[in-house]
């Protein structure tokens, strides 16, 4: 038995009801999940299964109806919206399906604003942003506006923005859904590398099978419940976990 | 970054920016012109009172303004006043409407001011040609050059008729305009008396007190001694004149009403454009919130947008107001702009934009960062 690292995020029995009155929906029906550093976890499930809702709760953007969520040792259930923002600022980076870049800011400025909201300004911050953009392969695109970047490039700017402040947790919602194969692979490879090299916990919501090969762990969600979890055995090659998953599925 | 984002948000939508700036500009120009005219009118109404060297004014009972006294005071009041403790000098001043017959025919009304400058009371001011010494020459008179046309004259040396006698232009003032639209004509006390055929009467007595005297006490003593006359401090007389012309006539109310309207219109336009800009950028503000920004950070972006609009709008607005100021110089009602008014307008603009930002801030307070995932 090898030492399991302490989870940086731990969710227990999360329930979330959305809407009100007759339109009330129980989107998450008691989900538990923990994230440890150094791993890329995929949260997979069909459309409408509650992936985005769960991710929003893990990211302290939505609060759960019941259940407990600890982030970096802090219990979040009694925090107000400013305290939650504070927690996001300290520990989290986000990546969205539609990138959510600021169209009026350059690539560099888009990354800088993530540091600016953290009070990191000036030359050092600017250097750090350049470094991160270079790291995601956009050294030549620093002063381009999102409108002049390809989808893949935009998502890489978003990845740079998410990791610029060195958060311990990176949460991504369908990061490859809007990208073609090649760009999708590039972004997943980037996320896997961030988890490995920088010892972050990366959780990506997806229903894109192309992403499987990059995962250390795959958590399955259906109808608001966690229904299974596969971990890539040590030493297993990336494609093998995909096979493993397929086989398990076939066996039911 | 707050300023950068605010700038980009503003300049991203040029049409909306133009509407915002025109709104502020319109508002500033309207307020500046209305208040500038108000100040201009006030200056016209009080300039003679301000220039007179008097602690107290003795007027006939019920005189409403500088132009409203007749010639009902006599040397009796003067002697009574001089006998009052604390009084140093009592200087007569005549102010009375008179018929001005132009050399080429036709006539107009003037306000004839009879004053002996060497008495130290009211000395003709803002002279650009001649001096008050020149007014002592036979028939001499001073008028303002902005009224030459109305008076039917061309300049120094021209003659006209006032009431009973002939007058000749010997000195010229510039910019001494009259709120009643009847030009002021300055001459000596005795010539004014001669023209009106009244050897003793006067409109006002300007009272100068001895140094260290209690002006309020002297005023009270004078009131007790003089019957049928009123004794006003300089301030009281100023206020009464302003009240008469600006408020009894409704002119001041109209000017201030116009200014308030300008403020209202400006605020509504800026609030409207800022609100719709915020609405358009709501997704971005939600992203900022998701990225962990405090709500204060987002408010600062909106306030910065309002502030930038205010500064640019103010610069444009005040420039246009200054052009109108120059153009209004020779009109019936010249506008006045003072540093205090310019500063006040700036404060007003910033305040107006800050209030406008409130509706946008209220909108952004309600954003749910969860929308970032559902675009
Ligand atoms: N704001 C909302 N109000 C009511 N129901 C919602 C709301 N958002 C999502 N839902 C419902 O909750 C369920 C889970 O949604 P979501 O978490 O977005 O699923 P996924 O990301 O897996 O596609 C769906 O049935 C969806 O219709
Ligand atoms: Mg989703």
Image: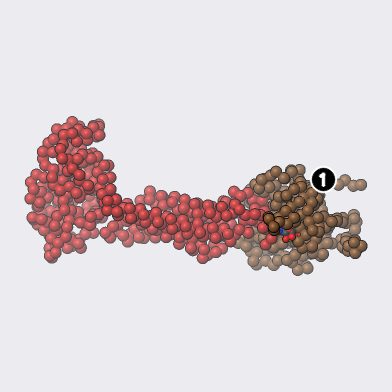
Q: Position of residue A107 (x, y in %)?
A: 66, 60
Looking at the image, in which quadrant does ligand 1 appear?
bottom right
Chain A's colour is: brown
Res B51 visible? no
Identify the coloring. by chain
Which is nearer the eye, A29 or B214?
Answer: A29
The answer to which of A221 and B202 lies nearer the viewer is: A221
Q: Of helix, strand and loop, which one carries label 1?
A: loop
Quadrant of the drawing holding the C terminus of chain B: bottom right
Question: In front: A22, or B224?
Answer: A22
Left or right of residue A109: residue A72: right
Q: Say which quarter of the image contains residue B180.
A: bottom left
**Residue wearing tag 1:** A6
Q: Position of residue B201 (x, y in %)?
A: 11, 45
Query: Looking at the figure, which quarter contains the N terminus of chain B?
Result: bottom right
Query: Which residue is at 7% across, 50% downward?
Result: B197
Left or right: B137 with respect to A222? left
Q: Which residue does the image show at 11% across and 58% down from the upper left?
A: B161
Q: Chain of mark 1?
A: A
Q: Which of the chains is red?
A: B
- Crowding at mark 1 (Cα within 10 Å: few <14, some 14-19, many 20+): few
Residue B361 at what x, y percent from top left?
A: 56, 53
| Quarter of the rendering containing residue B60 | top left
């Amino acid at each position: 038995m090898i030492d399991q690292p302490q989870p940086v995020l731990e969710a227990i029995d999360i329930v979330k009801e959305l809407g009100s009155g007759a339109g009330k929906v129980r989107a998450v029906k008691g989900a538990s999940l923990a994230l440890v550093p150094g791993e890329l976890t995929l949260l997979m499930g069909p459309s409408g299964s509650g992936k985005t809702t769960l991710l929003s709760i893990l990211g302290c953007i939505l609060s759960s109806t019941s259940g407990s969520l600890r982030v970096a040792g802090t219990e979040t259930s009694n925090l107000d919206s400013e305290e939650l923002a504070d927690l996001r600022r300290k520990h989290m980076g986000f990546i969205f399906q539609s990138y959510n870049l600021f169209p009026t800011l350059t690539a560099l400025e888009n990354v800088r604003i993530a540091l600016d909201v953290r009070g990191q300004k000036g030359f050092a911050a600017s250097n750090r942003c350049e470094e991160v953009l270079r790291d995601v392969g956009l050294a030549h695109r620093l002063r381009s506006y999102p409108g002049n970047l390809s989808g893949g490039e935009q998502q890489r700017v978003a990845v740079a923005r998410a990791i610029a402040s060195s958060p311990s947790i990176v949460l991504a919602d369908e990061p490859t859904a809007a990208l073609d194969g090649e760009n999708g692979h590039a972004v997943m490879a980037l996320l896997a590398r961030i988890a490995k090299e920088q010892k972050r916990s990366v959780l990506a919501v997806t229903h894109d099978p192309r992403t499987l090969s990059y995962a250390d762990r795959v958590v399955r969600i259906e109808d608001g419940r966690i229904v299974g979890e596969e971990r890539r055995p040590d030493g297993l090659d990336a494609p093998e976990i995909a096979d493993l998953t397929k086989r398990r599925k076939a066996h039911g | 970054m707050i300023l950068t984002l605010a700038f980009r948000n503003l300049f991203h939508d040029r049409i909306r920016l133009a509407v915002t700036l025109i709104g502020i500009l319109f508002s500033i120009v309207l307020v500046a012109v209305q208040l500038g005219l108000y100040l201009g009118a006030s200056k016209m109404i009080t300039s003679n009172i301000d220039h007179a060297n008097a602690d107290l004014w003795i007027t006939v009972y019920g005189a409403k303004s500088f132009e409203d006294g007749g010639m009902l005071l006599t040397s009796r009041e003067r002697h009574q006043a001089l006998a009052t403790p604390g009084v140093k000098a009592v200087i007569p001043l005549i102010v009375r409407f008179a018929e001005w017959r132009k050399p080429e025919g036709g006539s107009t009304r003037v306000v004839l001011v009879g004053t002996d400058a060497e008495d130290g009371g009211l000395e003709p001011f803002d002279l650009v040609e001649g001096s008050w010494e020149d007014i002592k020459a036979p028939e001499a008179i001073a008028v303002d050059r902005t009224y030459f046309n109305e008076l039917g004259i061309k300049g120094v040396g021209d003659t006209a008729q006032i009431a009973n006698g002939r007058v000749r232009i010997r000195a010229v003032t510039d910019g001494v305009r009259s709120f009643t639209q009847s030009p002021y004509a300055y001459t000596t006390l005795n010539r004014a008396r001669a023209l009106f055929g009244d050897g003793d009467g006067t409109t006002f007595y300007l009272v100068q007190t001895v140094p260290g005297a209690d002006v309020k006490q002297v005023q009270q003593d004078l009131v007790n001694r003089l019957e049928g006359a009123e004794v006003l401090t300089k301030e009281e007389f100023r206020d009464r004149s302003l009240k008469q012309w600006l408020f009894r006539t409704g002119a001041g109310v109209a000017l201030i009403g116009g200014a308030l309207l300008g403020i209202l219109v400006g605020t509504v336009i800026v609030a409207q454009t800022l609100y719709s800009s915020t609405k358009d950028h709501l997704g971005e503000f939600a992203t900022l919130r998701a990225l962990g920004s405090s709500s204060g950070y987002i408010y600062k972006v909106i306030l910065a947008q309002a502030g930038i609009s205010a500064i640019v709008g103010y610069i444009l607005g005040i420039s246009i107001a200054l052009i109108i100021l120059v153009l209004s110089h020779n009109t019936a009602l010249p506008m006045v702009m003072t540093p205090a008014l310019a500063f006040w307008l700036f404060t007003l603009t910033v305040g107006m934009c800050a209030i406008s930002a409130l509706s946008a801030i209220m909108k952004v307070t309600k954003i749910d960062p969860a929308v970032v995932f559902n675009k």
